[in-house]
Image (cartoon, helix red, strand yellow):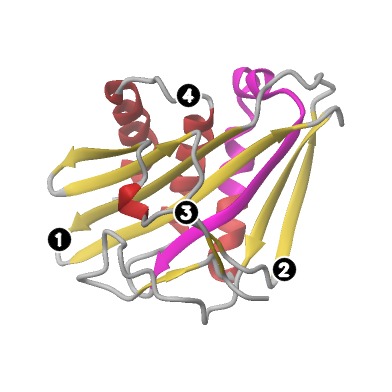
Amino acid sequence: MTLIKIGKELGGLSKMQTIDLGFHSQARVWLKDSLPFIYPALDIISQDIQTGLACKSETRQAALEIFIPVGPRVCYGLLGAKFSPNPSGKLSVKVRVSTENESIFSSSMAATVDTVKIGLPEEYSQSVMEGIVNSLTDPKLIETLGSGVIAIEQAAYGEISSSKKMFRNIAATVIQLLLLDQASCQDEVTKIVKTHSLASR
């Protein structure tokens, strides 16, 4: 399967917010928008959560790219999620697993310090699933979304700057961002990113 590239350059998307997290840490957030790539799936891991809830939410999209210097090293990751409502009475989480030989992501925030590739290899896919499923223990979050599918189809990772913990925390953060709308103020977005992602330090 070949890499699908769509849309504008990552930095040119009009709905992107750049956030200064302090101590040279930065993030880029997209709400209700899709990143300009979908990586090919070597496999898809999935998990269903029975909710018994009706289909009551709109399609939602959110993505987070984060760059956190920690002493002599850097923590990095990018993850995008899309929620599609359906009347199944459950929340299904589907995470694409990529190969480790995908395209270089040259416009990443960590491009000057690491080799960043598009995709989510098996090494990190289960951590993403854990971060999402753990977030879905919050009844308020489940009630807001209703029934449907949460799909992870967009990601990027650093060869030396990414970790399982980093992707677990990014996944939890992206699920929180799915609850926001495009009009959400940057202070609200910043609070969510700081609360859920900076534990990756």
Circle 2 residue:
43
Circle 1 residue:
71
Circle 4 residue:
180
The question of residue 5 being in magenta is answered with no
CA distance for labels 4 and 1 = 32 Å
Q: In the rendered structure, which disc, 4 or 3, sits on the residue that comes first in sequence?
A: 3
Q: Are marks 4 and 3 in contact (CB under 8 Å)?
A: no
What's under tag 4, amino acid-wise? Leu
Confirm whether residue 128 shows in the render. yes
Q: Residue at x 56, y 70 (%)?
A: 121
Q: Is residue 181 left or right of residue 26?
A: right
Nearest to viewer (mark 4 / mark 3): 3
Q: In the rendered structure, which disc, 2 or 1, sits on the residue that comes first in sequence?
A: 2
| Disc number placed over residue 197 in the picture, else none | none
What's under tag 3, amino acid-wise? Gly
What's under tag 2, amino acid-wise? Asp
Q: Is residue 94 left or right of residue 15?
A: right
